[in-house]
Image: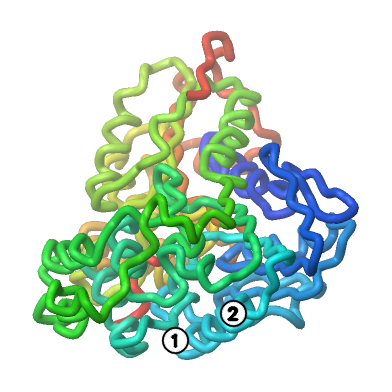
Amino acid sequence: MTPLVELARAMFAAAVAAVQPGVLLRRASFLPRGFEFAGQVFCPAGKLHLVALGKAAPGLADAFLRRSERQPDSVFVLAPDDAPTPTRVAAWTRYARHPVPDARGACATRELLQHLATTADDDGVVLLLSGGSSSLLAEPLPGFDLAQVELMTAALLETGALIRDLNMVRRHVLAGAGGRLALACRAPMMTLVVSDVPGDDLAIVGSGPTTADASTCADAGAVVRRYQLEERLPALATFLSSDAADSRPESVQPGDRRLQHSFVHLLGCSRDALGAAARVAEDAGLRTAVLTTTLHGEATSVGGALAALAQALTSGEAAAVLAAGETTVAVCGAGHGGRNLELALAAACGLAGIPERCILAAGSDGVDGSAPAAGAVVDGATLARGLAAGRNAAAALANNDSWGFFKDLPDAIMTGPTGANVADLAFVLAAGGVPPFLALEARSAQRLPVLGGTTSGTTRTSRSPQGRR
């Protein structure tokens, strides 16, 4: 493995460490009766209730309980089955399936809605919200059923729907989405959000359970038509149609006075992760720049574009270009993998035989679609390593079988669920100088070297669906 690849892995590790729940919650100041965040003091005179939802929920709840001077009167945690769960919060944690929901999520949602309805006006609810909550809050609105929610989710994922489109539909069919969780609560709510969506739109994270929603059922219906799913999802199309408008409540619209007691703040996002990764790269002598935090598009196309960018980086100058976001995969094959692995494999095809370049693509949550990997880091020798193992990259891409290609190769990034979730990360690295690239493949890096360049002028600028959310 080359020093450049080792550096990319070190950057990813630093990025994930920077957005761990315990790190992010240091941004809150804890007080004897509550806490302060972003200049807002939250110290309810009545009871204090703690709710944590999503992939980072157990870690967030644990970090809150460790730091809070006031222990909550109730704790409710809902997380995916594989979420790392500290012992402190295990007794309060419910689990449900992700990304396609199940009955456990619907049952937990009903329990949460009922619990919030019992709160008093002088109580306070702290909601720690992270990505993955949309599939966990699975209880549908009256007139729709759980089987249709499952079918809808799987269909939109398989067609490669954007997260903003998928969650727009969810906000109009789920009982806890689109501001409805806040409406169910009599007490004031303070929501701290760990964003996993491009652009950090808080109405999209977790389908905005405590946030106003500017979209309408008509907008959600347009999403169904855009992905040509009317015939596959007739019950959904009917539920969202104008004919059902009189019996179907809209999500909570902006300006709705019922949300006056709901306060929502961003706790952490992909920029925090990219900043930590950039510092590692800079310490190794690379100039760094942030390309975007809204990376999107078909994974194979984005992978090819990043490979072209890697080739275009100036020869002799060590550089790292960083990005975050979420690509999509339109599943047409029978293989296994995820959007990060597919992006990385497409990038490897573009880098074949090219020295002093590598590209990393991985999910900050440590999970990528139906694969056990978080993603992969590839370079000019990746395709050769695969070929030596009897694997064909083009065939794997055609069959959506990126995991079939990367399985057991050193390129795969195996972290397991990280307990963090701030979108997918992608790094493009180019080394300075002209070291013998293939010879370096056989060496193990003793100590990460400075790869050339200077820091002057640095700028910080249905099987399991492969597009997990």
Task: Report the mark closest to the observer, 1 or 2.
Answer: 2
> Is the residue 161 above or below the residue 5 in the image?
below
- Residue at which label 2 appears: 112
Of mark 1 and mark 2, the one earlier in the sequence is: 1
> Is the residue 11 above or below the residue 144 in the image?
above
Q: How is the image coloured?
A: rainbow
Tell me the tag on residue 102: 1
Badge 2 element:
helix
Residue 303, quarter of picture = top left
For the residue marked with disc 1, what is the amino acid? Asp
Q: Residues within 10 Å of mark 2 (few under 14, many from 20)?
A: many
The one nearer the camera, 2 or 327, is 327
Give the percent coordinates (x, y) of residue 416.
59, 66
Give the percent coordinates (x, y) of residue 356.
43, 30
Give the percent coordinates (x, y) of residue 462.
29, 83
The one nearer the camera, 295 or 47, is 47
For the residue marked with disc 2, what is the amino acid? Leu
> Is the residue 371 above or below the residue 283 in the image?
below
The one nearer the camera, 422 or 235, is 235
Residue 186, quarter of picture = bottom right
> Is the residue 11 above or below the residue 330 in the image?
above
